[in-house]
Amino acid sequence: MKTLYIGFTNNLVRRMYEHKKGIIEGFSKKYNLTKLVYYEIFTDVQQAIRREKQLKNWHREWKINLIESANPEWEDLSKDWGIDAETSSA
């Protein structure tokens, strides 16, 4: 079973670097969550926070359907950003 993590950030590239390198203690580090499979962009912080809360309250199946509607193969959408978990450096 895949573990899903929903979060909000103002800098997705930095946040993915932190996830891939295990820099931040917590849920994502504990479960080694280093793959970005879905994201949404907002220009309004309050709107982004509302969406995060909404998604966190969704049933697991709804979340999976949302991911698979945009990324059916569950590809790492950050794979071409140059922040490989094994080779990246600060």
Image: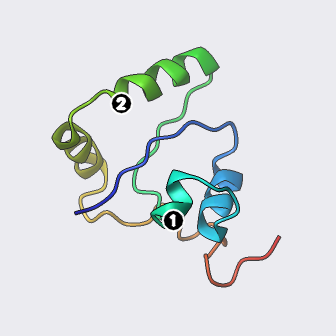
| Residue 62, x across and y down, in percent | 20, 37
Dividing the picture into quadrants, the one containing residue 41 is top right
> Is there any visible trace of residue 63 in the rendered image?
yes
SS assignment at label 1: loop
Query: Can you name the residue that lies furthest to the right here?
Result: 90
Q: Nearer the viewer, residue 73 or 16?
A: 16
Please indicate whether residue 17 sits to the left or right of residue 4 in the image.
right
> Going 68% across and 56% down the picture, which residue do you hit?
24
90 w.r.t. 42: above or below: below
Which residue in the protein does label 2 denote? 55
Please indicate whether residue 60 sits to the left or right of residue 44 in the image.
left
Q: Nearer the viewer, residue 54 or 23?
A: 23
Q: Quadrant of the N terminus?
A: bottom left
Q: Nearer the viewer, residue 73 or 24?
A: 24
| Residue 59, x across and y down, in percent | 21, 34
Which residue in the protein does label 1 denote? 34
| Residue 26, x across and y down, in percent | 58, 52
